[in-house]
Image: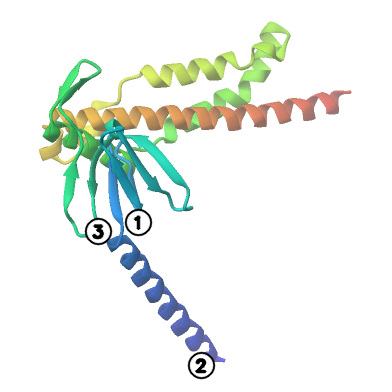
Amino acid sequence: MKQIIKLKILIFKVLSIVYIISSLKMFCQSDTILFLTGQKIYTNEVVVDEEEGIVKFKNKRGKEKVVPIDAIYSITNKNGSSKVFFEPRVIGKIPFNKDQMYDFIKGEMFSEKMHKTTVPFTTGLLVGSSSIFFSMYFLGTPFYSPILPSTVIFITGILPINEKKIKKIVPEVNYQNDYFILGYKEMATDKNIKASIKGSLIGFVLGLAGSIVAYNACR
């Protein structure tokens, strides 16, 4: 029995190693598209049409995607050589050169990994689940129940990101970089809004289900 267990463990380890090696091989043989949003796409097929101002590539499912070249910072091919397509320009009244935009993107990517959205999600969940009861109790109709979650989502989008939390998370060398912090805040705000929307929707559905159960129980 012990030998069978050991054999299964060995087979699992071998399969895991094969999977890791094949994944690394695929990664090394892919072109990398770096977007201004901080997103990275790995693809084996990418075509740049600078005259049309578009980039064509195939996603993981093999479907062709077309994006404007202005949305891309750089493309690194499988040989390791990279070409930057971003041209210095003003975005939202803020001037960016190539290095500043790269710092901004690094801030976005760091925020994507490190910024937590527990508070906006939980707040959205609580408000969403209770909104229908508040609407029924104070206004006598569930028609106005989406107002509270919508307000919370709006407030989440305009609230500034906590500077003290940023300083605890971000390395000092990057904290002194205004463009890195700007990218961090941009991504953090986007994540907060999405988490608030998700929490509000889940909460609203739970609240609606709860109100239906309560209504049927009182009949």
Please, what is the three-letter code of the amino acid marked with disc 2?
Answer: Gln
* Residue occupying the far top of the picture: 139
Kindly indicate the quadrant of the structure image that contains residue 127.
top right
Q: Residue at (53%, 31%) from the top-left corner?
A: 199
In space, the residues marked 1 and 2 are separated at their CA atoms by 43 Å
| Label 1 residue SS | loop
Asked if 211 appears above or below 139 in the picture, the reply is: below
Judge whether 98 appears above or below 2 on screen.
above
Q: Which mark is residue 44?
A: 1
Which numbered disc flags the more N-terminal residue, 1 or 2?
Answer: 2
Disc 3 packing (10 Å; few <14; some 14–19; many ≥20):
some
Q: Position of residue 23 (x, y in %)?
A: 36, 65
x 41%, y 80%: residue: 14
17 or 125, nearer to the observer: 17
**Pointers 1 and 2 in contact (C-beta within 8 Å):** no
Residue extending farthest to the front is 51
Residue 202 located left or right of residue 136: left
Q: Earlier in the sequence, mark 2 or mark 3?
A: 2
The crowd level at tag 2 (other Cα within 10 Å; few <14, some 14-19, many 20+) is: few
Q: Which numbered dot is residue 78? A: 3
Between circles 1 and 2, the one closer to the viewer is 1
Please state the horizontal and vertical placement of residue 188, each as a whole percent of the image.
Answer: 33, 31
What is the quadrant of residue 56 in the picture? top left
Question: Which sits in the foreground, 189 or 170?
Answer: 189
Q: Position of residue 54 (x, y in %)?
A: 32, 35
Quadrant of the rendering where the C terminus is positioned: top right
Q: Relative to the observer, which residue lies in front, 88 or 145?
A: 88
